[in-house]
Image (cartoon, rainbow, N blue to C red):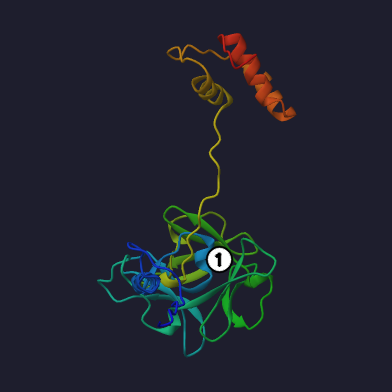
Amino acid sequence: MSEYKASKGKLSFKGDRDKKKKKKRKAEESIEEEGNQEGWVFAETQEDLIGPLFLIFNSEPLSCLYCSEKDHSIGVQPLPPGKQLSTIEPEDIASVFIGSRIVGSTDRISIKTFDEKYLASDKFGVITAEREAIGPQEEWTPIIKSDGIALQSIYEKYLSVDEIADGGYNLRADVETVGFCETWKIKCQARLRKKVKSTKKETKPISEYEIEQIKKYQTWGGGRVKTSKEEISELKKAKKEGNFAEALLDRREKVKADRYCK
């Protein structure tokens, strides 16, 4: 009689999916998703300002912040005519800056040029990029607006673009309020952009919460529940003291007969 040898391995059943195929499918989806995250997109949060940045001024034609490769001066350079704000991307390294979070801060950043120097403003609003170390003058606070981003110096003045007589632009940081000339369109690399998930819980008024409880435990009488200001204040007090559930039971007993209240 021949011996029966049991095959080793995990039992499989009809309808089971192949895990290898599933992993392969997930990997392909991940690659496809990463492939879609190319190019430059508008920064919307402070987290988006960590990494390569392209600072655009919405002039006509468009212009951008740049660091001269010859003398390393900082200025505003006009971009080729016909470029669209939504699709424009940096074409040379002189117009790409690196944003970094200031150590120990949650709302301040530094902005570094391609030659490892930091964008700075003195108390008179003069803009330079000469230092390789970060001090107070190299710190900037981004102000997120609906139409762009403003950059505030340590002296509470804003990075501004001033058009001069010959059609050029002057860069300064001595303006105390934010207007069109202080609003920048900043782009970051799409693959580095971070999506912030909202963790806020929706809070409802106590009166609405009470109505929900009555709907849940009692026969609903067409919305005939009235809560006075005094009763709302009593419920708020009970909530602070940790007796909110008991207070609601007392309220339900007063409002309508409820067999679960007693």
- Work out whether 159 lies above or below 206: below
Q: How many marks?
A: 1
Residue furthest bottom as drawn: 70
Point out the image quarter for the N terminus. Answer: bottom left
Which one is in front, 126 or 82? Answer: 82
Give above or below for 128 relative to 224: below
Q: In front here: 224 or 165?
A: 224
The image shows residue 86 at horizontal and vertical percentages of 32, 65
The furthest residue to the front: 1
Residue 174 is situated, as x and y percent measured from the top left of the image, at 57, 63
Residue 159 visible to an observer of this rendering:
no
SS class, disc 1 = strand
Residue at 44 percent across and 61 percent down: it is 181
The image quadrant that residue 35 belongs to is bottom left
Q: Nearer the viewer, residue 217 or 109?
A: 217
Q: Nearer the viewer, residue 2 or 185?
A: 2
Q: What residue lies at 51% left-to-right and 67% top-to-bottom?
A: 49
> Is residue 40 something that shows in the picture?
yes
Tell me the quarter of the picture where residue 96 sits: bottom left
Quadrant of the rendered structure where residue 94 is? bottom left
- Identify the residue at image location x=58%, y=82%: 117
Determine whether, in the image, residue 149 is placed left or right of residue 245. Answer: left
Going by the image, does 60 lie left or right of 152? left
In this rendering, would 27 be left or right of 257?
Answer: left
Residue denoted by label 1: 173
| 182, above or below 253, in the image | below
Query: Which amino acid type is marked by label 1?
Result: Ala
Looking at the image, which residue sits at the far left? 82
Q: Residues within 10 Å of mark 1 (few under 14, many from 20)?
A: many
Q: Quadrant of the C terminus?
A: top right
